[in-house]
Image (cartoon, grey):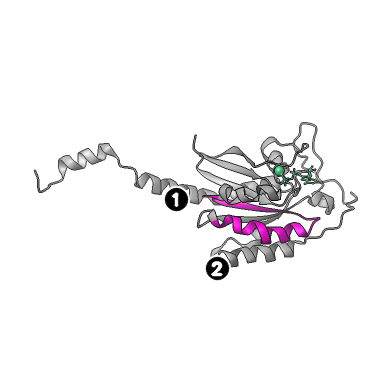
Amino acid sequence: MKPDGKVVLLGDVNVGKTSLLHRYMERRFQGTVSTVGGAFFLKQWGPHHISLWDTAGREQFHGLGSMYCRGAAAVILTYDVTNFQSVVELEDRFLALTDTANRDCIFAVVGNKVDLTDACACVPEAEDGHLSEKPISSSVPTKVKKQVRMDDAIAFYKKILKYKMMDEKDAPAAEKMCFETSAKSGYMVDQLFETVFDMVVPTILEQKAEGSSQTVDLHNYKTAKNTQPGCCR
Ligand SMILES: Nc1nc2c(ncn2[C@@H]2O[C@H](COP(=O)(O)OP(=O)(O)OP(=O)(O)O)[C@@H](O)[C@H]2O)c(=O)[nH]1
Ligand SMILES: [Mg+2]
């Protein structure tokens, strides 16, 4: 089956791309090994099928990134909130890989591992693997220093728009497209993917309409041929 749309996760090694995908698709946080090449999941979203591509952050696979981004309807640029360099890398190494994405590609900027820095992101997981509704109290110790603030992510999102030569007025608002997540606790993970999917649906519908208008309908063609007057009748 051919997916209707493509969403790609990009970002430096160890930021948690694979963990975010596992959390969303399999509803759990499990041990990962550093990704080799790339892999994808298929997600049904309403009547549409969306492929979700996980890519390798390791330098040696960097060349594959633009291949994975080819024709992408959305790119999720992921960093680690405890590692400022991971945002720098997004700008320096990963943004250019998105040149092969769709012209109207949607961008989301995601700061992962926020459970390490923000007590409110430490939502306990129930035994069945689902998330509890109730956040644990703010007394949860968060020992790691947050190196990337939301303002930094918003500034980076604006740089993306500039790079893509998009007017801020015509693009989705930075506040809507910048997320802080925890693959470990599940914090904001569904919201991230669901926002992105909702935003790619119009592109999918447009592509489907374009595709069907380019398809020759033989039945209608015959009818038209039989009923239209022509010079060779
Ligand atoms: N505390 C915490 N650790 C996380 C989180 N997400 C991932 N990790 C850990 O970070 C490490 C890297 O996670 P991966 O998901 O493999 O990272 P990746 O971005 O896929 O890395 P590459 O495949 O090498 O590019 C693992 O040890 C994860 O357990 C998170 O939200 N919170
Ligand atoms: Mg990975």
Left or right placement of residue 46 versus residue 115 in this view: left
Instruction: Say which residue appears at 65% left-offset and 45% top-offset.
Output: 55
What label sits on residue 80 in the rendered view?
none
In the image, residue 168 sits, relative to residue 189, either above or below, namely below
Q: Where does label 1 land, which residue?
A: 206
Q: CA distance from mark 1 to mark 2?
A: 21 Å
Q: Secondary structure at mark 2?
A: loop
Q: Nearer the viewer, residue 29 or 39?
A: 39
Say whether residue 76 is magenta: yes
Residue at the front extreme, as displayed: 60
Query: Total of numbered circles in the picture?
Result: 2
Q: Which residues are magenta?
A: 70-99
Q: Tell me the quadrant of ligand 2.
A: top right
Q: Where does label 2 land, which residue?
A: 167
**Mark 2 Cα-neighbour bin, 10 Å: few <14, some 14–19, many ≥20:** few
Left or right placement of residue 34 versus residue 210 in this view: right
Q: Nearer the viewer, residue 83 or 13?
A: 13
Left or right placement of residue 70 versus residue 109 in this view: left
